[in-house]
Image: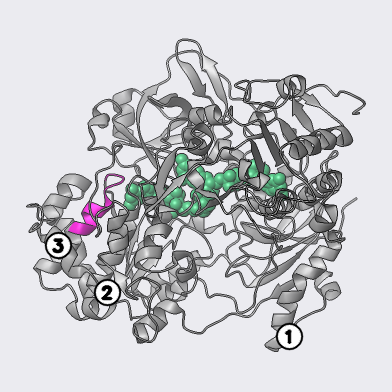
Amino acid sequence: MTTRFRQHSSHWGAFRARTTPGGGLEIEPFEGDPDPSALLRNIPSALSHPARLSRPLVRKGWLEDGPGPDARRGSDGYVTLDWDTALDLGARELQRLGASPALPVGPPLPGARVFGGSYGWASAGRFHHAQSQLHRFLNTAFGGYVASVDTYSTAAGSVILSMVWGDAMKLNRDHPYLDELAEQTELLIAFGGLPLRNTAVSGGGNSQHSARQALERAAERGAGFVSISPIADDMAALPGLVHLAPRPGTDVALMLGMAHRLHETGRADRAYLDRYTTGYDRFLPYLTGAADGIPKTPDWAAGICGVPAPDIAALADRAAASRTLVNVTYSLQRAENGEQPVWMALTLAAMLGQGAAPGAGFCYGLGSIGNVGKVRLDVPLPTLPQGRNGVGDFIPCARIAELLLHPGKSYSYKGERRRYADIRLVYWAGGNPFHHHQDLTRLAQAFARPDTIIVHDSVGTATARHADIVFPATITAEREDIGAGGNDPFLVAMEPLAPVQGEARDDYAIFAALADRIGCAPAFTEGLDTEGWLRRLYAPTQAALLARGSPAPDYDDFRQGMILPLPLNHADGAIRRFHADPDAHPLRTPSGRIEIFSARVAEAGLPGHPAWLPPAEWLGAPLASQHPFQLVANQPAGRLHSQLDFGAASRESKNDGREVARLNPDDAARLGVKAGDVIRIWNGRGAVLAAALPSAGIRAGVVQLATGAWYAPVHLPGVGKTCVNGNPNAVTSDRGASVLSQGCAGQLALVSVERFGGPIPDTVPHEEILPRGRPENGAA
Ligand SMILES: Nc1nc2c(c(=O)[nH]1)N[C@H]1C(S)=C(S)[C@@H](COP(=O)(O)OP(=O)(O)OC[C@H]3O[C@@H](n4cnc5c(=O)[nH]c(N)nc54)[C@H](O)[C@@H]3O)O[C@H]1N2
Ligand SMILES: Nc1nc2c(c(=O)[nH]1)N[C@H]1C(S)=C(S)[C@@H](COP(=O)(O)OP(=O)(O)OC[C@H]3O[C@@H](n4cnc5c(=O)[nH]c(N)nc54)[C@H](O)[C@@H]3O)O[C@H]1N2
Ligand SMILES: [Mo]
């Protein structure tokens, strides 16, 4: 029987769905979305894919030999247990590690040995948000946990901007850049392009895809676009588009060349620099070469970035003569010394002196995430209270392998000396580190160290494959929730679309059952069931709507399948206010100004102004003679990260189930590689197989392989351990972006590429990544 349409939401859009007589799911995008995402097509497969987990699994070695470091993680077998037995085992282990209803007063709290950072995107829905549930649980049961800060998305960029501009994540969500781009910008200089595929998603919900329209409106007005990227299709083919393809990782040199030209031709805006910035005079001797004997001329820049000097000079001239918006996508900073391109772009924009003009100045992350550049909301969104983390310890999120491998080791972060904790328990819910982290061979070694690893997921990921206890979670389509995302102007009453698969349970139910066994259920649940929580979470948003006189339906009315429009806040944001009056509205930097020189950055061990710092892995590095290709490991067009990799849109982006790697046709010809050939991409850290696609839009010397294929390391005779499905993190580097941010540097890596000569190994199907054991002790 066909059911009625029900309302739901995802990170890539709101939609309605109904089940079809064949048990499928028919999806219609939200009618208010001007440009719905094709990623919606991945959702139906989630309901009953064989990779779904339906019963708890426990690793054999852990069950037989007890908790402890164990190198068998990743290759051991699993036993299927019934829920009560598995929950008893889990709760007993949590209690052994100190979970208790009555925690010690003051340090050391038992949570100091628990890593609960649990980085990952999980699913839309404010209550069933896996990390929030986990953090609340660990705060209740352990008094806290070792957390993680920053994101894989942006760490180097956010850390540097927090010191020289202000809180980037607040500022770049505080400015209606998309409207201004559509209406005011004359020239968009887009470092990293402005890939529409990436604006498809936004954490928590993205019911209004508006980037394409904004670009088209700007183009109709005659705006110019310069996409600066090693890959041509990082920007839609708009009229007036110019594409410059620098060597990856060299944008700072290109920007310096432009800055030098502005200075030389007298077009660096001194009035702006004096009024809104500090430190230009400390930067200038570096730019001119007075400090180091190397003038950063367009010629100098061309020798590094590979963009011809006349093009660099012409771009500077054009930028100075136009109302210019300088945008940097997150990708540039997910790299060694990733702070520098972001800081240098801010400096370049300041030299252009247009920050006070609508549609001009500096922007960070337009084209990276769907909510950047949209008008902010005027009411708070529902949020699950996480309680208090009494432990207070954290790692920069991309230092997970370091943390587990080197307890006690000291490292620096934002100029501070810190030490890694000694972690005995790793608890992950809502993320997939064996997709997202760099150098996965090293991560596997790190995951051998703790006593116990617990993972919740709805599918058998490579992370679950390294866990001791795997609890099967429901998917969002099986739950009732409230969908909401930053800058997204709709609150969605998410209705369950389908019955729960197998014996999967909501994350909340799993934690509640563990809390019950530990004796801290009252504190964790506060006596509320899911509906009770949804009502409580809705109340502050409703109160804020009422207070400003906006439509504010009661919860029960909202529940009737509503998509509730939320009011926008059109008041000037912090950047606009700063430009109106920098004394009255200083930036949150030590000087209150944009800092082109920062004492704090200098104290932290980096140059005090933006500078070209050659990374260890770029096409001009000594290592390039050994591994002559630059891998660009960017975001996938056919899915969100590793989620629903088996869905229709993701499958169509692959070749026979294997991820596709694009390379320049001349490189392909030289390597004897044709479209569809399997290539091996490798370096000293590992190897990965992909299906080759020669493509004229890829810069020579670059091979592009998106993230998210499920990691499947297989020992190939004569070749060694190789990910046969195509996850680029088999070969990326785990070094931090710098001593300042310790951010993820996974976007770029030097690799070798060759046609794979041996017998072509099959890919590993999703349902075989985590082998399921036979049921034991009564589980049906
Ligand atoms: N080389 C390289 N690596 C990168 C990047 C790169 O550019 N290059 N990009 C990085 C970036 S920006 C990011 S954000 C990360 C993304 O990395 P992740 O956020 O870890 O990736 P996802 O695939 O979104 O993982 C989410 C997991 O949560 C599970 N999940 C979904 N809903 C639920 C739920 O309700 N409950 C539970 N328990 N689980 C659920 C999904 O099945 C999935 O396994 O990758 C990073 N990795
Ligand atoms: N469809 C889809 N959209 C997504 C995601 C997804 O998984 N799927 N993930 C979301 C998440 S969590 C995030 S954080 C954002 C990430 O947003 P970004 O980090 O901005 O996105 P990427 O796709 O990694 O990179 C964008 C482009 O930058 C270019 N690039 C790489 N290195 C360089 C360089 O050194 N110089 C220049 N000039 N260009 C370079 C590459 O050609 C690449 O295609 O995307 C979000 N959007
Ligand atoms: Mo991200």
Name the residue beneath numbered marker 1. 546
Q: Quadrant of residue 158?
A: bottom left
Spatial CA distance of label 1 from label 2 is 41 Å
Q: Nearer the viewer, residue 265 or 411?
A: 411
Give the image location of residue 763, x and y in percent.
58, 24
Q: Residue at x 42, y 41 (%)?
A: 410
User: Up-down: is 254 above or below 420?
Assistant: below
Give the image location of residue 725, x and y in percent.
55, 29
- Type of amino acid at the residue the image marks with label 1: Leu
Spatial CA distance of label 3 from label 1 is 54 Å
User: Up-down: is 159 above or below 670?
Assistant: below
Give left or right: position of 560 versus 131: right
Is 248 covered by the magenta stretch?
yes
* Ligand 1 positioned in quadrant: top right
Spatial CA distance of label 2 from label 3 is 18 Å
Name the residue beneath numbered marker 3. 260
Q: Secondary structure at mark 3?
A: helix
Q: Earlier in the sequence, mark 1 or mark 2?
A: 2
Task: Check residue 603 in the rendering and tell me which mark sits there, or answer none.
Answer: none
Q: Quadrant of residue 365?
A: bottom left
Q: Secondary structure at mark 2?
A: strand
Q: What's drawn in magenta, residue-wise?
A: 247-256
Q: Quadrant of residue 193?
A: bottom left
Give the image location of residue 729, x and y in percent.
48, 35
**Coloring scheme of the render?**
one colour
Q: Nearer the viewer, residue 16 or 400?
A: 400
Count residues near mark 1 (Cα–Cα under 10 Å), then give few for <14, some for 14-19, many for 20+: few
Disc nearest the viewer among 2 and 3? 2
User: Up-down: is 555 above or below 1?
Assistant: below
Disc nearest the viewer among 1 and 2? 2
- Type of amino acid at the residue the image marks with label 2: Thr
Q: Earlier in the sequence, mark 3 or mark 1?
A: 3
